[in-house]
Image (cartoon, coloured by chain):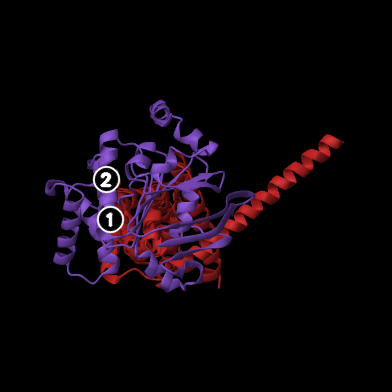
Amino acid sequence: MIEVKDLHKSFGGAHILKGISTTFEKGKTSLVIGQSGSGKTVFLKCLLGLFSPEEGTISYDGKIYSELSGDQKSDLRAEMGMVFQGSALFDSMTILENVMFPLRMFTKQSKSEMQERANFVLKRVNLAEDDHNKFPSEASGGMQKRVAIARAIVNKPNYLFCDEPNSGLDPKTAMVIDNLIQEITEEYNITTIINSHDMNSVMEIGQKIVFLKDGLKEWEGSRDNVFKTDNEAVTDFVYSSELFKKVRQMYLEERV
Amino acid sequence: MKLALNTFLFFNLAGIIRSMNYLHNIGAYFLMIKQIFRKPTKWSVMKRLIFNEIDDLIIGSLGIVAFISFFVGGVVTIQTALNLTSPIIPKTLVGFATRQSVILEFAPTFISIIMAGKVGSFITSTIGTMRVTEQIDALEVMGINAINYLVFPKFIALMLYPFVISIAMFLGIVGGLAACYFGGFVSIEDYIIGVQMDFIPFHITYAFIKTIVFAFLIATIPSFYGFYMRGGALEVGKASTTSFVWTSVMIILSNYILTQLLLSV
């Protein structure tokens, strides 16, 4: 479980995060949503330890990040997996080498053991064996995302972070990626946090939703009550698409 | 009057801000140097990275270095021979002048400026592209010291740079010999006698000391500009240009200081 208390972060004179408090539970897929510029990426980078907050604490299963020593922070980071918006695969390595990379860095496994584990997770994300020796530049966007997920989970992380994992993907592939993340979260009982502004993802896999606006937590809840909320900022965001406007109308008509 | 005062204040303020930026960059550069040697990457991984960098930075540069050295050595010989027209100056001086120019300046300094362009821009653009595509963030999220992982192998690979420079020295002198043979400016015997004349072994030491310093600059300055760049593809290009300019400036400055320190005793 990840617990965030009163998180503040500024850059120069710009106060980006203005005191966010929330919790993310184990085995659940949590989504952080909000418009562009709401502070989602800064929030995620604080959770990853890439940015140091000025105020507030982040604790990972009881371990407060700011109180850990350098080595303890490194050990904790080895328990984290991250899927970047642009996949961030190392282009000098093949798909198999990319997935084996965390094992090579943090374990003492033999080459065959590493290969076996990498093949297993690549199979788990439905990547054909013929593609294992391709370079990232030869892979499609959806394939790159699946490799990024495989690399993030290969070292059995306790925490999985995804920054807009289905941006730039067609709706069908985006749904496959969303479902894959949820399945993996439940299967390995990990704490998963996804940054997104895709309402389809919210409806598909949002077991917990945190809505950010102007660096503040505006609302939190589940996908079931995101349509029922009276919070104006949330309804503005959720119903910005025609499809969801119709869904809300149907819901309200049903209620009447 | 007011306009003149405002203009003066504006330019002064701009100058102060620019100086602060330079100071900030110098500080950040030295912090990066410290970071190169901290929290080392696993040796089994690092070993492979070092061999890859040797292949990219050293072996990959041999062709261009050999080509330039051979022909510039030839040109130095032709220029010297054509300018020494007085009958009282011995022809052996052509070989002597070529050897001195090649060993003291051409091979260590001129080749280093070329390497700052070839290798330096390669380093800045590869690290810069990794920054733009979040590959460096990916390394940091995994708890890897990205500076050690990316810069240390380049630093070690470039410690083999004196090997490149010795090839440049040898080929520069051979180029001069070839120019004598094909151009007929000086006899081959006179050229070889000149090359062997009044040889001071310390000049080789001086050249290699310079080479090691230049290798350090070529490995670290472009890495700094790549690692700390922000933006997209356009900024990668700008960072490569800036890194080449600053690496060249630092090579020329350190060349002057080292020459003053080592040869003017």
Asked if the residues shown at circle 2 and circle 1 are in contact, with their CB atoms under 8 angstroms apart, the answer is no
Q: Which residue in the protein does label 2 denote?
A: A179
Q: Residue furthest front?
A: A256
Q: Which of A33 and A67 is in front in this view?
A: A33
Quadrant of the rendering where the N terminus of chain B is positioned: top right
What chain is the purple one? A
What chain is the red one? B
Q: Where is residue A170 shown, x and y percent of the image?
A: 29, 33
Q: Where is residue A153 shown, x and y percent of the image?
A: 27, 58
Q: Residue furthest left?
A: A130
Where on the picture, by quarter, is residue A105?
bottom left
A3 vs A241: above or below: below
Q: Residue A186 carries which label?
A: 1
Q: Where is residue A66 shown, x and y percent of the image?
A: 51, 68
* Chain of the residue under label 1: A
| Residue A88 in view in this figure | yes
Circle 2 crowding by C-alpha within 10 Å: few under 14, some 14–19, many from 20: some
Which element is circle 1 on? helix
Quadrant of the rendering where the C terminus of chain B is positioned: bottom right
Where on the picture, by quarter, is residue A164?
top left
B53 vs B4: above or below: below
Three-letter code for the amino acid on which mark 2 is drawn: Asn
* Chain of the residue under label 2: A
